[in-house]
Image (cartoon, helix red, strand yellow):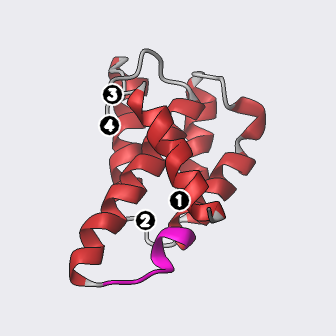
Amino acid sequence: MSKLTKLVEQIREELATLSEAREGTVRVFLTILTHKLTMYDKRLSTRQPNTFRLGHFLDAASKVEKDMKRHLDSDDPKHLEKLKAAIGKRFIVRDMPPAKAVIKQIDAFIDKGKLPKL
């Protein structure tokens, strides 16, 4: 089994337990980002097949996670703002639908306390 296949399986297992989050930590938002990236690639693959795209997406998400590794279990607004900045830094296209959707959910959590959803 390839490294990418193992990662996708791990993500699926995490998502099976996370249809609606019970907390708004950095780790939860990163899981949601990974899910949205995977689904986005799946939608694009029907029109624009590219075997490397998902790997690039997941690599960028992994770099965001490394940037935030000390704050993964934090739901502090200042750490969530850092997460938004890390997403903006690692995803060159800031209007990319998955990144934009997660940033929108982070804002809703900070402003209204609304828990994130897949």
* Badge number at residue 88: 1
Q: CA distance from mark 1 to mark 3?
A: 25 Å
What is the secondary structure assignment of the residue under circle 3? loop
Of residues 7 and 93, the one nearer the viewer is 7
Q: Is residue 105 magenta?
A: no
Vertical comparison of 7 with 114: above or below = below
What is the secondary structure assignment of the residue under circle 1? helix
What is the secondary structure assignment of the residue under circle 2? loop
Q: Which residue is mark 4?
A: 118
Labels 1 and 3: the sequence-earlier one: 3
User: Which part of the image, by quadrant, shows the C terminus?
Assistant: top left
Q: Which residue is mark 3?
A: 19
Q: Which residue is mark 2?
A: 94
- Residues at marks 2 and 1 touching, judged by CB atoms closer than 8 Å: yes
Labels 1 and 4: the sequence-earlier one: 1
Vertical comparison of 8 with 44: above or below = above
- Residues at marks 4 and 3 touching, judged by CB atoms closer than 8 Å: yes
